[in-house]
């Protein structure tokens, strides 16, 4: 497989993941206070929403790269 086709496959997978999931959530830990052997940390949860247009664009671009990568 050519590199153009691999990029197309990756974009297709990202587009399918974006359409099937509403978004991605993550947790960020921050050390607030650290004295001697005691450490106080704060965990913040966040969510990243994936827009519908970005998922559709990734699918279309991935399909286009896969199709043009096959031609000589």
Image (spheres, helix red, strand yellow):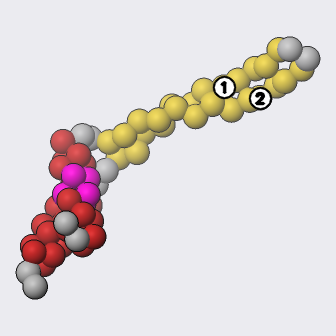
Q: What is the chief secondary structure element of the magenta stretch? A: helix
Q: What residue do we see at 17% from left, 61% from top?
A: 59
> 70 or 34, which is in the foreground?
70
Q: CA distance from mark 1 to mark 2?
A: 7 Å
Which residue lies under the disc numbered 1? 42
Locate residue 41, reporting x and y percent.
70, 23
**Marks 1 and 2: CB-CB under 8 Å?**
yes
Residue plotted at (18% across, 73% down): 65
* x then y, percent, for residue 7: 27, 65
- Expressed as whole percent of the image width and height from the top left, the position of residue 66 reads 14, 69
Side of 35 where 72 appears, left or right: left
Judging depth in this view, the residue of 72 and 24 nearest the camera is: 72
Residue 58 quadrant: bottom left
Question: Is residue 40 part of the magenta span, yes or no?
Answer: no
Left or right position of 17 against 42 = left
- Residue toward you, 43 or 69: 69
Q: At x 23% / y 46%, what residue is drawn?
A: 17
- The region drawn magenta spans 10-14
Picture layout, residue 27 above or below residue 1: above
- On screen, residue 67 versus residue 20, left or right, reads left
Can residue 64 be seen at all in this image of the molecule?
Answer: no
Q: Secondary structure at mark 1?
A: strand
Quadrant in which residue 38 is drawn: top right
- Residue 32, which numbered label? 2
**Quadrant of the image containing the N terminus:** bottom left
């Amino acid at each position: 497989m050519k590199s153009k086709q691999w990029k197309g496959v990756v974009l297709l997978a990202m587009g399918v993941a974006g359409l099937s999931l509403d978004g991605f959530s993550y947790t960020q830990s921050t050390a607030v206070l650290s004295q001697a052997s005691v450490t106080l940390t704060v965990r913040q949860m966040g969510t990243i929403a994936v827009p519908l247009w970005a998922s559709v664009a990734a699918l279309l671009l991935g399909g286009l790269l896969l199709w043009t990568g096959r031609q000589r």
